[in-house]
Amino acid sequence: MLPVKANGTPAFAQYRPAEDGNGWTPWGITLLEITDGRISTMTNHIDTKRLFPLWGLPMRLTADAARI
């Protein structure tokens, strides 16, 4: 998971193991809505082909990139 911001709220880009076993590929973006200091809503977006480029997120993470 990589932290991002979406619509002014905290969010996380999620990756899953790549089918070829080489790194990780996009899974989705989860937006968190915070109310009174607590997570009140989690919204998941799975249109990775459209959304990941909008945030400048890589379409594949390698083992080296995951060590950031």
Image (tube, helix red, strand yellow):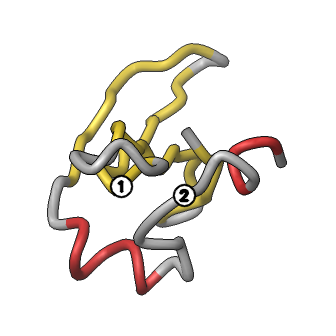
Residue 58 horizontal/vertical position (percent): 52, 72
Image height of 36 relative to 60, above or below? above
Please give left or right for residue 60 compared with residue 19 in the image: right
Residue 51 horizontal/vertical position (percent): 31, 75
Look at 59% across and 55% down and name the residue there. Answer: 62
Look at 83% across and 48% down and name the residue there. Answer: 68
Q: Name the image quarter holding residue 4.
A: bottom right
Question: Quick one: SS at disc 1?
Answer: strand
- Position of the N terminus by quadrant: top right
Look at 61% across and 47% down and name the residue there. Answer: 2
Q: Amino acid at mark 2?
A: Leu
Count of numbered marks: 2
Residue at the spot of label 1? 25
Image height of 51 relative to 11, above or below? below
- Cβ–Cβ under 8 Å for marks 1 and 2: yes
Look at 17% across and 54% down and name the residue there. Answer: 46
